[in-house]
Image: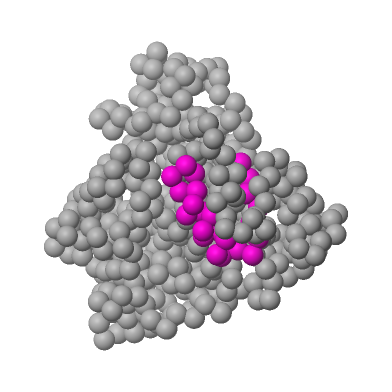
Amino acid sequence: MIRPDLSLPLPDTIEAAHFIGIGGSGMSGLARMFLERGIRVSGSDRADSPGLRQLAELGAAVYVGHDASNLADDVDTVIHTGAIWPENPEFVLAKQRGLHVIHRSQALHWLIGHRRLVSVAGAHGKTTSTGMIVTALQAAGADPTFVNGGVIAQLGVSSGTGSDELFVIEADESDGTFLLYDTSIALITNVDPDHLDHWGSRDAFDQAFADFANQAREAVVISADDAGAVAIRSRITHPDVITFGTAADADIRVTKIVTDGPVSFTIRHGVAAAAVQLAVPGAHNAINAAGAVAVLIALGYDVLTAARAVEGFSGTARRFDLQGVTRGVSVYDDYAHHPTEVAAALAAARTVVGEGRIIALHQPHTYSRTQAMFQEFADVLESHADHTVVLDVYGAREDPVEGVTGELVSDAFADPAHVHFVADWQDAADYTATVARAGDFVVTLGCGNVNLIIPQVLDALERTTPSER
């Protein structure tokens, strides 16, 4: 892993940019925007993907695998994620050539320029909230530029170039880069402890969010419900703070939440109130929508306009995303990789599964998070799913840690009859298919590559007779 050096100067101009790790949703979105600016784009990733192929169709030179030969002679700027290693041959050659070598957050900072920036931060809920803000602004007549961490369903892209001064981004707290941006309006969805391997302590993590809020030029929008967000309020000295949530003292208050199918609720701002019906399920999405409405209010819209605008949001890729139905079993994919996210995703599934059961197919993400939170994951999975299949850990940027496997999660279940650890993916798909019955939901959970098991699950469902589990 490479920690970003945010002190590095940004180039004045960029004519040819090479992206190391171009296939990810965030990086591919940046690359798309560079292409829209008329900048020559190349890039590499360790595996082929639809994102890579789409960029190639748009004119980017893309490569599967990392190799020094991928770095063309005309490249003047290299953009990388924090997930690559210092020994990456393209990274090493770029340094040897003396090129501008910048982290993806710095590339985004370069793209933003002097636009009026809305930055969305939080341990979870960022991608959905950013998508809600973007689509609501469009519905209200604005045309923002945006970079999101996932594809916005009704737009089919994770980034886009708009014509007005607004720029909306998902800002990453995991490595501190959310403090880099010149934010006008800061949205904090929650301050749930995560990425403490980077921050070192909960206090440092909390202070970073307070700094993010206090740096905002115009307003801070922050959850009134999340315990972590409430705890840092005393550290926030910004003169314009707007709170949102179900709390009685929230400025933008959510009441009358109904989760029978797509979530509905009432949203209040002062004496004004609006009934809202979303196209997505889950009480957590009512809260996300309140945060988006609060941002629009901070931008000058009234609550009724904002509430109507947010209703059109239809979700983001890998957030309770239906992948197929076989033998009456619906298979969904969700990016949830923190206990709070897993609880929210499965609670949303429960509101629409009816008489069916929920079978979670969980891939723990990173050794450090699994080691720190295995019991929390086990508790959430056992209480929210009817049965859980646990895969092995997706290490991402981390080296393996002895004794830290997916079995750490499965062994922490109080009732071992509710969980099954299977390291081999085909075996896991086959086992899942024997458990699932017509009417059940299978939900893959994780921000690694667990979504790639879905074709195996659908195939196994096609050829397997369910058991009586």
Q: Is residue 362 left or right of residue 77?
A: right
Residue 36 in view (yes/no) = no
The single residue placed furthest to the bottom in the displayed view is 271
Magenta span of residues: 370-392
Q: Is residue 352 above or below residue 142?
A: below
Q: Is residue 133 left or right of residue 230?
A: right
Q: Is residue 184 left or right of residue 466?
A: left
Q: How many callouts does the rendering have?
A: 0
Residue depicted at 53% across the width and 68% down the height: 347
Residue depicted at 34% across the width and 84% down the height: 273
> Where's residue 113, x and y in %?
29, 43
**Quadrant including the N terminus:** top left
Residue depicted at 45% across the width and 80% down the height: 257
Q: Nearer the viewer, residue 322 or 90?
A: 322
Please identify the quarter of the rendering in which residue 270 is found. bottom left
Q: Is residue 87 above or below residue 447?
A: above
Name the magenta segment's main secondary structure: helix
Q: Nearer the viewer, residue 403 or 263?
A: 403
Does the stretch in magenta take in 342?
no
> Where's residue 189, x and y in %?
35, 60
Residue depicted at 54% across the width and 35% down the height: 403
Q: Nearer the viewer, residue 284 or 15?
A: 284
The single residue placed furthest to the top in the displayed view is 96
**Quadrant including the C terminus:** bottom right
> Where's residue 365, x and y in %?
52, 44
Q: Is residue 331 above or below residue 272?
A: above
Does the stretch in magenta take in 384?
yes
Indicate the colouring scheme. one colour
Residue 430 in view (yes/no) = yes
Q: Nearer the viewer, residue 335 or 91?
A: 335
> Where's residue 462, x and y in %?
83, 56
